[in-house]
């Protein structure tokens, strides 16, 4: 995803440097999009370099966000603007505490991209990218250049609501697909369709208690629409499990459950799925 955005920003004429531990002065990125292949070259910088960073986009897995920012902490100052584009919620909390002088922004994207191999990315589906900052109604100045490069998309004055709704969808879809090793479309059929319904009944009250009201029926309807639209896709969590990678479950279902506990709400199926993922994340469950 980072390569996709880097290409879009560079093509719009913005100066983009890739942060990379492993490369020399330049990195070439191969981008397959709309049946065309393009090669773009970027200057590269190692995290330990000294040059200050004015604007940074972080597109790591949720569990790597803190370490990614911390690795360049010496290059960030009170003018640094950092956009975090990761799945789930909760990855920013420790950053606000550790780096109170840095301006952090949050984002959500439905762009579809996958890595063919390192620095070779395929743009698989056009999406929409929202950027915002809790409590900030108007975009900052840099957002004008960003939005000329990254479209469709826009400033989201209610980014927290957007991220909670995305979290709710991810909680209803990703763990089931990861545990059952199935594509999203399987969730529209029994027996998993019943579990989706039950999950929505647990998730919606937590969203509502957090200040983002949604009924279980309305959430279920949205989940069904996403399942239908992405029926042939493997969810990001299933891809992680199949690749033997750590999943982002702690930042998705884990975050939801922490909020549920704060509000005294029960979410037993979500609890069971998280426990199951932690135990069997890398093996096929026997149910
Ligand atoms: O995480 C994902 O894979 C996606 O956001 C979605 C659409 C919920 C499942 O494919």
Image: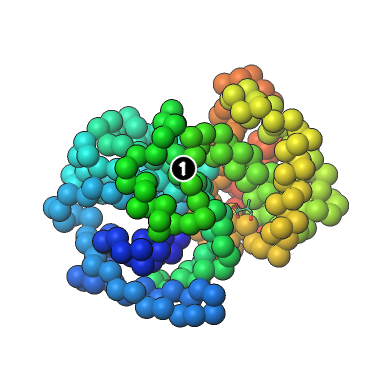
* Identity of the residue furthest to the top in this view: 264
Query: In the image shown, does 178 or 20 lie closer to the viewer?
Result: 20
Q: Relative to 113, say whether 84 is above or below.
A: above
Write the residue at 16% across / 56% down. 49
Q: Relative to 209, say whether 195 is above or below.
A: below
Write the residue at 22% across / 43% down. 76
**Residue 155: where, in percent of width, then height?**
46, 42
**Residue 198: where, in percent of width, then height?**
78, 37
Observer able to see residue 275: no
Q: Relative to 110, say whether 169 is above or below.
A: above
**Residue 36: where, in percent of width, then height?**
49, 80
- 217 to the left or right of 275: right
Observer able to see residue 239: yes
Write the residue at 37% across / 46% down. 143
Q: Residues within 10 Å of mark 1 (few under 14, many from 20)?
A: many
Query: In the image shown, does 147 or 186 lie closer to the viewer?
Result: 147
Write the residue at 56% across / 34% down. 161
Q: Secondary structure at mark 1?
A: strand
Coloring scheme used: rainbow
- 51 to the left or right of 140: left
Question: The N terminus lies in which quarter of the figure?
Answer: bottom left
In the rendered image, which residue does mark 1 sit on? 155
């Amino acid at each position: 995803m980072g390569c996709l955005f880097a290409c879009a920003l560079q093509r719009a004429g913005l100066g983009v440097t890739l942060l990379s531990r492993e490369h020399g002065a330049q990195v070439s990125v191969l981008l397959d999009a709309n049946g065309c292949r393009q090669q773009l070259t970027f200057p590269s910088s190692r995290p330990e370099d000294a040059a200050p960073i004015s604007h940074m986009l972080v597109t790591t897995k949720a569990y790597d966000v803190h370490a990614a920012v911390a690795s360049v902490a010496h290059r960030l100052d009170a003018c640094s603007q950092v956009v975090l584009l990761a799945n789930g919620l909760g990855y920013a909390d420790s950053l606000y505490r550790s780096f109170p002088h840095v301006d952090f922004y949050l984002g959500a994207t439905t762009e579809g991209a996958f890595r063919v191999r390192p620095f070779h990315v395929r743009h698989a589906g056009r999406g929409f990218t929202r950027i915002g900052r809790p409590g900030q109604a108007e975009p900052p100045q840099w957002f004008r250049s960003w939005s000329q490069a990254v479209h469709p998309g826009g400033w989201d004055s209610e980014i927290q609501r957007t991220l909670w709704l995305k979290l709710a969808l991810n909680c209803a879809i990703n763990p089931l697909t990861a545990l059952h090793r199935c594509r999203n479309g399987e969730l529209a059929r029994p027996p998993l369709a019943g579990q989706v319904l039950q999950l929505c009944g647990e998730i919606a009250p937590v969203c509502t208690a957090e200040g983002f009201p949604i009924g279980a029926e309305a959430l279920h309807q949205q989940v069904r629409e996403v399942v239908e639209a992405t029926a042939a896709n493997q969810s990001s969590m299933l891809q992680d499990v199949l690749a033997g990678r750590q999943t982002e479950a702690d930042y998705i279902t884990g975050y939801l459950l922490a909020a549920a506990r704060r509000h005294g709400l029960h979410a037993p199926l979500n609890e069971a799925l998280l426990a199951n993922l932690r135990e069997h994340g890398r093996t096929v469950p026997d149910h």
